[in-house]
Image (cartoon, rainbow, N blue to C red):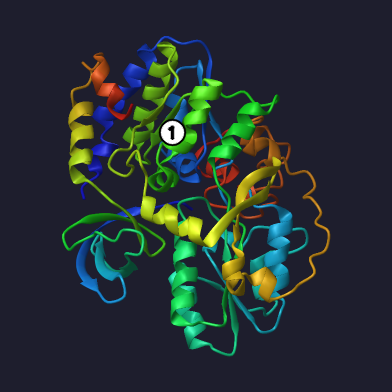
């Protein structure tokens, strides 16, 4: 599929002109997807916005919003000798209270990066004497894959595969942000692939109850500009709706098959978001019926009381209260080579994106 | 992390799996979440699973609309997702 037109400078220029031609007061637009964070930083889209339009990065990087307690739990699981930890590469370097999965691997624990939860299933079949644990971090995009993997494990009769699930769901977290008196958001650039699964319905309360418009947006520069333009047009016209700027990847109804699978395996639980705190109903817990695949129930561990990272302002960055370069330690002690907080560790973290693609915050 | 890329379905395999072509690279992925995919279809792939069929027509339509820039002051062009 040829997507080059979605990177076409001519089309982008037209959209930038149209954005500049909109008439609104100062507007704060938040994106809530790490892939948008990178797309905006890499393509220099902040610099082409009119001065009155501020693009903020929200809690859209699943690794970044994972609480220390959850990272510490993954580390305690890794320390059990029979366990092989499998996870996506992004999780490896994220610091918990005292260690990271990467540091544990260097100390001899068996921690492996996989491309897909299916790789973890294959590993479990190959290593019947070991306990293969998939450390699952992610949003609605990834949750159906984890559910499918658990259902496949059940079907295959695998007895040595389990999941530590630190998954989170997006819409209610956005509502919590809108209700946070410290946070000011006029519109949301909504995550494209989360929406591929959930569709438009779950976001509608943002528009209807709070008057905050949203545009479900793709990841090429033209997609992002289109999303911004649609939001500015809504604000200009005094509308608040959930629109789709990414029709090639998102249907209004989402993917019902995927949602049904998630519903079958998981139930909503409270989740602890780094920097935001506990938001009721935004986590996914493995249902009792599938308890045999729940790593924390299968492999009892004791997790010490977590401690917070000193000096790191990730929490404020994730809520859009400060921009990454306004953090006291940004580029001064905290860099992608020597990250202190998760927003600088993950390639999708807003601090890492600002550091790699812009010169803000550096003399 | 929620990265997903377009792939073309080449061949259906047993157990809801399919061989796909991702920018010239052949991979085997799961069709658990997109049961109706057939050879020739485009799907969005995320971490070894197809998560949605992609309608190529939508991509073309969006571009056709955008290509009418800078004369797109008319409402309908932008209200495509409403």
Residue A214 quadrant? top left
Q: Nearer the viewer, residue A193 or A339?
A: A193
Q: Is residue A180 above or below residue A66?
A: above
Q: Chain of mark 1?
A: A
Residue A175 quadrant? top right
* x then y, percent, for residue A66: 65, 52
* x then y, percent, for residue A85: 60, 74
Q: Is residue A157 above or below residue A295?
A: below
Q: Nearer the viewer, residue A349 or A352?
A: A349
Q: Which residue is mark 1?
A: A44
Q: Which residue is rendered at x = 48% and y = 76% of the image? A: A153
Residue A134 seen? no
* x then y, percent, for residue A269: 64, 52
Residue A160 seen? yes
Give the side of residue B48 with respect to residue A176, left or right.
left
Q: Is residue B32 above or below residue A10?
A: below
Residue B57 quadrant? top left
Q: Which residue is rendered at x = 65% and y = 37% of the image? A: A317
């Amino acid at each position: 599929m040829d997507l080059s037109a979605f990177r076409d400078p001519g089309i982008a220029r037209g959209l930038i002109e149209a954005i500049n031609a909109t008439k609104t007061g100062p507007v704060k637009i938040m994106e809530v997807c790490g892939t948008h964070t990178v797309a905006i930083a890499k393509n220099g889209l902040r610099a082409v916005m009119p001065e009155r339009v501020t693009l903020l990065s929200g809690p859209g990087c699943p690794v970044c919003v994972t609480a220390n307690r959850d990272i510490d739990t993954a580390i305690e699981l890794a320390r059990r000798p029979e366990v092989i930890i499998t996870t996506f590469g992004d999780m490896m370097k994220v610091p918990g209270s005292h260690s990271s999965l990467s540091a544990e691997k260097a100390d001899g624990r068996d921690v492996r990066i996989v491309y897909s939860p299916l790789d973890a299933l294959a590993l479990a079949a190959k290593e019947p004497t070991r306990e293969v644990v998939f450390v699952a971090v992610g949003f609605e995009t990834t949750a159906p894959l984890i559910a499918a993997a658990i259902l496949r494990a059940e079907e295959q009769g695998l007895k040595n595969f389990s999941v530590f699930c630190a998954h989170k769901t997006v819409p209610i977290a956005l509502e919590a942000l809108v209700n946070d008196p410290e946070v000011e958001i006029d519109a949301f650039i909504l995550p494209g692939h989360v929406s591929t699964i959930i569709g438009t319905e779950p976001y509608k309360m943002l528009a209807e109850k709070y008057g905050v418009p949203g545009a479900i947006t793709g990841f090429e520069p033209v997609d992002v500009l289109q999303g911004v333009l649609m939001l500015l047009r809504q604000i200009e016209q005094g509308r608040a709706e959930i629109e789709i700027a990414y029709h090639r990847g998102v249907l209004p109804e989402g993917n019902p098959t995927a949602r049904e699978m998630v519903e079958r395996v998981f139930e909503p639980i409270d989740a602890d978001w780094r920097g935001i705190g506990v938001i009721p109903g935004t986590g996914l817990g493995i249902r009792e019926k599938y308890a045999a695949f729940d790593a924390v129930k299968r492999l009892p561990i004791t997790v010490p009381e977590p401690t917070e990272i000193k000096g790191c302002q990730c929490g404020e960055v994730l809520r859009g209260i400060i921009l990454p370069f306004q953090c006291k330690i940004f580029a001064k002690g905290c860099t992608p080579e020597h990250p202190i907080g998760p927003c600088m560790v993950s390639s999708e973290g807003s601090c890492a994106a600002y550091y790699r693609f812009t010169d803000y915050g550096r003399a | 992390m929620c990265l997903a890329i377009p792939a073309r379905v080449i061949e259906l395999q047993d157990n809801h799996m399919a061989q796909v072509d991702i920018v010239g690279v052949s991979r085997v992925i799961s069709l658990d979440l997109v049961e109706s995919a057939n050879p020739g279809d485009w799907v969005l792939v995320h971490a070894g699973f197809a998560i949605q069929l992609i309608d190529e027509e939508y991509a073309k339509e969006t571009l056709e609309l955008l290509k009418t820039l800078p004369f797109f002051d008319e409402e309908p062009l932008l209200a495509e997702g409403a």
